[in-house]
Amino acid sequence: MLFRQLFDKESSTYTYLLADLTLKEAILIDPVLEKVERDRKLLEELGLSLRYCLETHIHADHITGTAKLREATGCLGVVPDKADNSCADRYIKDGETLQLGSITIEAIATPGHTDSHITYYVNNDRIFTGDALLIRGCGRTDFQGGYAGTLFDSVTQRLFTLPDETLVYPAHDYRGHTVSTIKEEKQWNPRFVGRDRTNFIEFMANLNLPDPKKIMEAVPANEHCGNLVEGQDNKIPKVPELSKQGE
Amino acid sequence: MLFRQLFDKESSTYTYLLADLTLKEAILIDPVLEKVERDRKLLEELGLSLRYCLETHIHADHITGTAKLREATGCLGVVPDKADNSCADRYIKDGETLQLGSITIEAIATPGHTDSHITYYVNNDRIFTGDALLIRGCGRTDFQGGYAGTLFDSVTQRLFTLPDETLVYPAHDYRGHTVSTIKEEKQWNPRFVGRDRTNFIEFMANLNLPDPKKIMEAVPANEHCGNLVEGQDNKIPKVPELSKQGE
């Protein structure tokens, strides 16, 4: 499997490229609208066709590149099944598997940051955790149907029960870390170490974070796969023109 | 070998952590002053002692974390042998090898960005190229004894002759790429593809880049391993107080 981690400095978002080199087909996890040209160029240089764009969740801090990539490449947009989203080509739910050649992706439901959040478990050795589990942190739980108790359960019951050596690739990092492991997070993540569910809920309730700068445009746009209406401050998304592509 | 890539957003600098897990000893390549606490914390959490800090070259865009790390951990500072630097614990030159348990690091002289630039070739499968070779780019050649012809020779004769699958880890990236390969850079790096030495020299001479913001403080500080004098705008470095530690 070819694997690349890509970074958007503005939103501190990681996008991940996975590819099967026999099929010459690729998957992007959590692409960012402003980075679509970078990602397309890299795919082209590597001789890869983009087959799927996977979202871990409906993001509030950046707009997904999925619609633009779908329009350009014909890839399929894959979104968690309970997400407020009407334009995905495929909805994926807990326990479902997506296969691309040698790449096996298992969906693990990890709600709490949002109510429809999926962690992607790839080839039994790495997880793409979106905003559920960050390196020495976790996503906030104060909007989009988030709830701290649910996130605590997702992380401690679904992720911390994976093998210790599992690599953890989050959707964001703000301190310059790129990867961690389940062992490290169980041992050192200050959001979870030494806290029970009640204590975690109390801690998260007192974070008092400001809203993400882009939330008013990002959430509605991402509910429509990243499609925007021009000339309307990008606040009202356009339903995608492309017909849904069955798999 | 444990391997971690770390990023400083302000200067877009990558620092690399390599560690032998039997010895529990680590190496940092190109640490950044402002990120020393992050790096120390990570080393501590991973149960690692820092043995060496390696510089690929005397940086002009950020101040090295080596002096501060040396003071805190007793690690040894390793610097290219021709660098204008009087405080290193060890100077390393082309062809020399540094061994730490299972980690073999071979020094490849790659001058041109600066006159004393080293690429570190680790375990015959990855290179840490500093500013000599960037992903789809290269370092500038208009100060610190830089010369475009020399950089062209370094990249095309010393790096592009390594095996195609060699992983390329640069000291910077400004577009969010994290890694490349020699094959990709030979095929797609626009600074080198389709250019001969003369054309490259002409191209580099016409870049007309502004000086890096921190050059006036970074270069003198880095010539002294990152030591600064407080209260003097950090522009006049202090000779390190620690006695040189022999190896």
Image (cartoon, coloured by chain):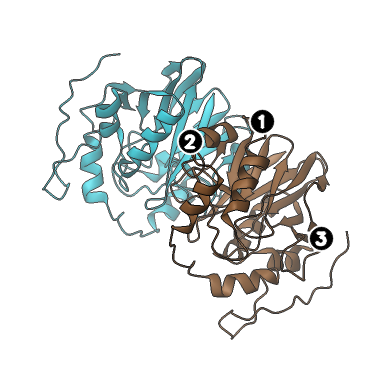
Chain colours: A cyan, B brown
Q: Where is residue B68 in the image (x, y as percent from the top left)?
A: 69, 68
Q: Where is residue A226 in the image (x, y as percent from the top left)?
A: 24, 37
Q: Distance between the residues labelled 3 and 1?
A: 29 Å
- Look at label 2 and name its amino acid: Trp
Marks 3/1 same chain: yes
> Element under label 3?
strand
Marks 1/2 same chain: yes
- Look at label 3 and name its amino acid: Arg
Q: Name the residue under label 1.
A: B163
Identify the subunit bearing mark 3. B
Residue A210 seen in this snapshot: yes
> Element under label 2?
helix
Q: How far apart are marks 3 and 2 (CA)?
A: 36 Å
> Element under label 1?
loop
- Look at label 1 and name its amino acid: Pro
Q: In this view, does A233 lie above or below B159?
A: below
Q: Where is residue A6 in the image (x, y as percent from the top left)?
A: 46, 41
Direction from residue A242 to residue B245 in the image, left or right: right
Q: How far apart are marks 1 and 2 (CA)?
A: 16 Å
- Front of the two marks 3 and 2: 2
On-image quarter of the C terminus of chain B: bottom right
Direction from residue B188 to residue B80 in the image, left or right: right
Q: Residues within 10 Å of mark 2 (few under 14, many from 20)?
A: some
Q: In this view, does A153 lie above or below B62?
A: above
Sequence-wise first label, 1 or 2: 1
Q: Name the residue under label 3.
A: B90
Residue B230: quadrant of the picture: bottom right
